[in-house]
Amino acid sequence: MKEGFLVTSVKDVIRWGQKNSLWPMSFGTACCGIEIMALLGPRFDLARFGAEASRFTPRQSDLLIVAGRVSIKMMPVLQRIYEQMPEPKWVISMGACASSGGVFNTYTLVQGVDQFIPVDVYVPGCPPRPEALIDAVMEIQQIIDQGDVTIAQFKAFAKTHNPAPGQPLLQVERGPRG
Amino acid sequence: MATINVQRPERLTLAERLYLPAILNGLRLTWRHIWGERVTLQYPEEERQFKRVYRGVHRLNKDDKGRVKCVACEMCAASCPAHCITIKATEVEWPERDKIPKIFEIDELKCIFCGYCVEACPEDAIHMTRHYHLIARSREDMIFGLDKLLAIYDETKEQEVLRGVDFGMTHARIPGKEAANPDEVQKLAYPVVGVVTKAETQRAQ
């Protein structure tokens, strides 16, 4: 008998549940946060995709939306938030600043949050339209549908949470004044 | 000591203590809104129509022979505030120009869609379309090269999109539409186009 034969349909049910009740944790640090507000509002209404329960507490959410520029001092906070989110979890990098730094090519700004946390879907734009973000949420749903919810994510979790000895999770060069 | 004495009511009235009138009031409001106008845009099925001057993803235009119109002068790369355009030129021996881009890459993730490249282009070779459905699973996917930008042109050839002349640039060449004075440029640039959703159009019909 093949491995997981008895629980094949259970996986599908879990996927269906995860897909249709994404709880976003919006990390809105700039103008992209305003677009998230529009997205949650009646005009675009993310509730149609079951993802309206924005709790602003990482322990109850499974979709991190990084919206806006993240400075090097803010990055440990974002990383802590990411780590506090229970598995399985997905990340959307929204807008030019979060995805690549955008126009802010300076020493204070993280040039793309994917240098520190794994990102599943990137949304370009400055800021992106709420429709584009709906596209991204639908892409996350596709990722959930395609992915192996249990084993692959556990492996990814183990990889990110157990860095090699002497290798800090967050590598930031700090100046004399911190 | 300045002290403000606030007069608080001794007790709540019976109606207030029951909470029911307040709940019913709230429910009445909800009920009214159920039958009111529906504002939700049913996005994947229904899309918003934008003005012609919306700044979405770029496209690289082709000339009448189907070749890339760009002359690799790097004006767009110089004007880009996000430095998201990379151009490598190569020499050609065509009668009307000496060089064309060998590599033309726009990092759409770095781009802030300001439209300065469209404004800067002296050849009117780069436009911005109304297409905004851009998402990717990796950063590499969002670096659009020559092939992709030209493919976007093929897709949106029929559309009227954002051009250099929209910024009042009189030097930008628009085939068939030569503007003599600035007023005319403005008229060419801003025809009256309303913002209506598909649903609103259907309702009007």
Image (spheres, coloured by chain):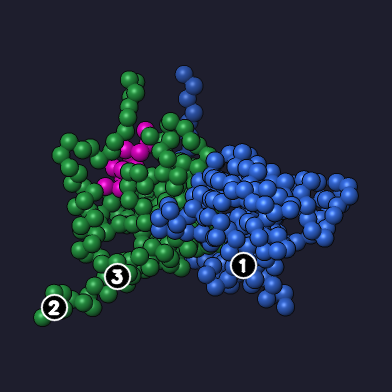
| Residue B76, horizontal then vertical, whole percent | 63, 44
- Secondary structure beneath disc 3? helix
Check whether the beta carbons of the residues at disc 2 and disc 1 lie within 8 A of each other: no
Which residue bears the numbered disc 2? Answer: A2
> Residue at image x 21%, y 51%?
A159
> Residue at image x 45%, y 44%?
A100
User: Which of the numbered marks, if any, corresponds to residue B155?
Assistant: 1
Q: Quadrant of the N terminus of chain A?
A: bottom left
Let me know if residue A31 is in the magenta part: no
Distance of label 2 from label 1 (alpha carbons)? 47 Å
Distance of label 2 from label 3 (alpha carbons)? 20 Å
User: Which circle, 2 or 1, is nearer the viewer?
Assistant: 1
Q: Which chain is blue?
A: B
Which residues fall within the magenta stretch? Answer: A73-83
> Residue at image x 58%, y 58%?
B149
User: Which of the numbered marks, if any, corresponds to residue A15?
Assistant: 3
Residue B161: image quadrant is bottom right
Q: Residues within 10 Å of mark 2 (few under 14, many from 20)?
A: few
Q: Is residue A142 left or right of residue B103?
A: left
Q: Residue flagged by tag 1: what amino acid is it? A: Glu
Mark 2 — on which chain does it sit?
A
